[in-house]
Image (cartoon, rainbow, N blue to C red):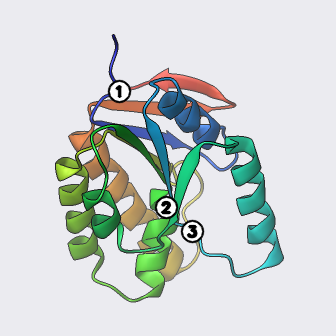
Amino acid sequence: MNTLPKLTLVLGGAASGKSAYAEGLIAAYGLQKVYIATAQVFDDEMATKVARHRDMRGEGWITIEEPRDLSAVLSQALPDQAVLLDCATLWLTNVMLADEDIPAASAALLRALATCAAPVVVVSNEVGQGIVPDNALARRFRNAQGALNQAIAAQADRVVAVMAGLPMVLK
């Protein structure tokens, strides 16, 4: 029987289909499905997006809402579970907004992914294919997200880019 790789990174642009693809990966293996949601709801638009994602996922998921402390959540995962972390981009945003040390937080996340007992699929936005942002904060975020994506990809067993709902295996 095929097994889910220990760590899979699913990258894509906004509304590319990356979350639906990642959910399908998790569902295909018959393990208990755990969804780690990093989004924080601050407005009606985000509330609608979260509800839409929840509806698309359907029943049978254990949902854990954790905007920043992913190490604690990942350390509790069990070998008979499959974890979907959606998404690293919102997690990084939360870390930045909390004025945390980004390299230290990223290193802690990478350690937690490496030691997690369950296979993990991480969803993340590819933010480096657009124009150069016009302000320092946006450029800092783009650079930090690019570095995080590269570090997760280097550690991952499989990396898939999703564009227009179509997966392209990169690694």
Between circles 2 and 3, the one closer to the viewer is 2
Q: Residue at x 31, y 52 (%)?
A: 77
Residue 166 visible to the viewer: yes
Q: Within the image, what quadrant is residue 118 found in?
A: top left
> In this figure, which residue is indicated by the disc labeled 2?
89
Taking depth in this image into account, of 1 and 7 the one nearest to the observer is 1
Q: CA distance from mark 2 to mark 3?
A: 16 Å
Badge 3 is on which residue? 133
Q: Answer left or right for 49 relative to 75.
A: right
Relative image position of residue 6 (x, y in whole percent): 27, 35
Q: Position of residue 53 (x, y in %)?
A: 70, 51
Residue at x-position 23% and y-position 45%: 117
Percent across and percent down for residue 54 are: 70, 52
Q: Quadrant of the N terminus?
A: top left
Residue drawn at x 37%, y 66% as measured from the top left:
144
Three-letter amino acid code of the residue under disc 1: Leu
Q: SS of the residue at dot 3? A: loop
Sequence-wise, the earlier of marks 3 and 1 is 1
Dot 3 crowding, Cα within 10 Å, few <14, some 14–19, many 20+: few
* Residue lying at 46% horizontally and 26% vertically, measured from the top left: 30
Residues at circles 2 and 3 in contact by the CB criterion of under 8 Å: no
Residue that lies at the very extreme toward the bottom in this rendered image = 99
Query: The residue tagged with tag 2: helix, strand or loop?
Result: helix
Q: Position of residue 80 (x, y in %)?
A: 33, 37
